[in-house]
Image (tube, grey):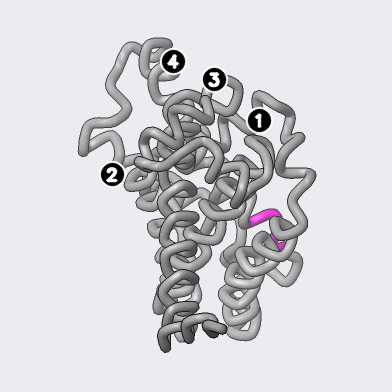
Amino acid sequence: MSTPAARKPGALGIRAKQAQDTRAKLLKAAIKVFAKQGYASGRIESISKAARSHDRMIYYYFGSKEQLFIEVLETIYTQFNEAESRLDLDLDDPARGLAQMVEFVWTYYLDHPEFVTLLSSENLHQGKHSKKSSKLKEISGYAISVVQRVLDAGKAQGIFRAEADPRDVYIMIASLGYFYNANQYTLGAFLGESLMDKAALAHWREVIKDTVLRAVLVAPGG
């Protein structure tokens, strides 16, 4: 009676790596397709084709189109946090540290337009997919904590207002950058000017820095 062939050493590791790679390719393709076409129009067939895979693999790894989109949202926020975690914020000079953070967020939006378009798509759906995520609150908690560190350093030095709230500052930075990028076409047409040339982008970056710092710095003589 023949015995089953022994599994080759490392076979499980190879299969796990292949599965991980396939899942990552599908997720990367989904980010591109949903960013370009939105959730409603982004088709499973388009995603599997972009990933050079098969529709059934999407259902195998993610269960549904909705769950895939939820993971897309979690992924783009996680990637943002990972990029932000590599920042070497100047806590000895908290005003500079806060300016560094503003510049990071602004540059990230410019370098990752898919981040802006995916969030715009989700807002069209009133955040119904985001609300089903069990991870986004944890992810946002990290983002707020980064702002908190800078504000705490500034408060300790007496240069930031004691009541400056990290949540408010985070929303201020995010909204000033997001609105400009998400509405660049309509706002540009409305104002009759290009918002995306080099000089315009540099100007708005400085406006954001100035606005945020004015909101948190202790007033002279205060």
SS for tag 4? helix
SS for tag 2? helix
Give the residue at mark 3.
41
Q: Residue at x 43, y 79 (%)?
A: 11
Q: CA distance from mark 3 to mark 2?
A: 34 Å
Task: Give 29 or 48, whichever is nearer the viewer.
Answer: 48
Q: Magenta span has 165?
A: yes
Q: Magenta span has 101?
A: no
Q: CA distance from mark 1 to mark 3?
A: 15 Å
Farthest residue, direction left: 198
Image spot of residue 8 (x, y percent): 41, 84
**Dot 3 amino acid type:** Ser
Give the residue at mark 1.
123
Q: Nearer the viewer, mark 3 or mark 2?
A: 3
Q: Tag on residue 186?
A: 4
Farthest residue, direction front: 1
Q: Quadrant of the C terminus?
A: bottom right
Give the residue at mark 2.
202
Q: Residue at x 65, y 62 (%)?
A: 139
Q: Is residue 109 left or right of residue 118?
A: left
**Dot 1 amino acid type:** Asn
Q: Nearer the viewer, mark 4 or mark 2?
A: 4
Q: Residues within 10 Å of mark 2 (few under 14, many from 20)?
A: few
For the stretch drawn in magenta, the main secondary structure is helix
SS for tag 1? helix
Q: Nearer the viewer, mark 4 or mark 1?
A: 1
Mark 4 or mark 2, earlier in chain: 4
Q: Residue at x 33, y 47 (%)?
A: 111
